[in-house]
């Protein structure tokens, strides 16, 4: 990231976490948008994590608001590498003792929020 004006901090410990990704972005605007995106993912909303929900705006009309448009730009046009960000996320996650790999166990995150369909569990 080019150095210049500092990025507006994200709330609480989220900013320290987000700063660990700053070198993967080429501009201050991307770093700022990444923080806003992460904050949106953590918002306790009653609806699915649509673009407008991530921006904390109303569903249909909110898509035209600046907040939603900046999330849209970040996710589709700003030119960062999602694979690099994901690899960094996994590396950071695995540094946490609670997330350390255990041969006989697996951590599965279901981001869909959908209820399980049926009574059987997958066994591999």
Image (spheres, rainbow, N blue to C red):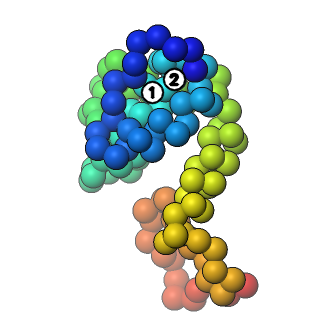
Kindly identify which numbered label has been placed on residue 30: 2
Above or below, 112 against 3 in this view is below
CB-based contact (under 8 Å), mark 1 and mark 2 = yes
Q: Foreground: 4 or 42?
A: 4
Answer with left or right where residue 13 lies relative to residue 82.
left
Q: Which residue was labeled with disc 1?
A: 33
- The residue under the point 28% across, 50% down is 45
- Horizontal arrangement in the rendering, residue 4 relative to residue 103 (left or right): left
- Residue at the right extreme, as displayed: 124
- Which residue does the image show at 45% across and 44% down from the upper left? 17
Q: Which mark is residue 110?
A: none
- 67 and 42: which is toward the camera: 42
Residue 86 in percent (x, y) is at 63, 47
Quadrant assignment for the N terminus: top right
* Residue 121 in sight: yes
Q: Is residue 50 above or below residue 120?
A: above
Q: How would you rate the neighbour count of disc 2 (Cα within 10 Å): few for under 14, some for 14-19, many for 20 or more?
A: many
**Element carrying mark 1:** helix
Q: Quadrant of residue 2?
A: top right
């Amino acid at each position: 990231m080019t150095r210049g004006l500092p990025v507006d901090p994200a709330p609480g410990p989220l900013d320290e976490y987000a700063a660990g990704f700053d070198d993967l972005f080429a501009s201050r605007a991307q770093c700022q948008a990444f923080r806003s995106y992460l904050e949106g993912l953590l918002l306790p909303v009653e609806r699915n994590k649509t673009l407008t929900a991530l921006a904390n705006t109303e569903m249909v009309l909110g898509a035209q608001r600046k907040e939603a448009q900046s999330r849209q730009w970040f996710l589709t046009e700003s030119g960062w590498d999602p694979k690099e960000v994901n690899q960094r996320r996994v590396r950071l996650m695995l540094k946490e003792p609670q997330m350390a790999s255990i041969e006989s166990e697996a951590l599965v995150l279901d981001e869909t929020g959908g209820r399980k369909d049926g009574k059987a569990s997958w066994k591999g």
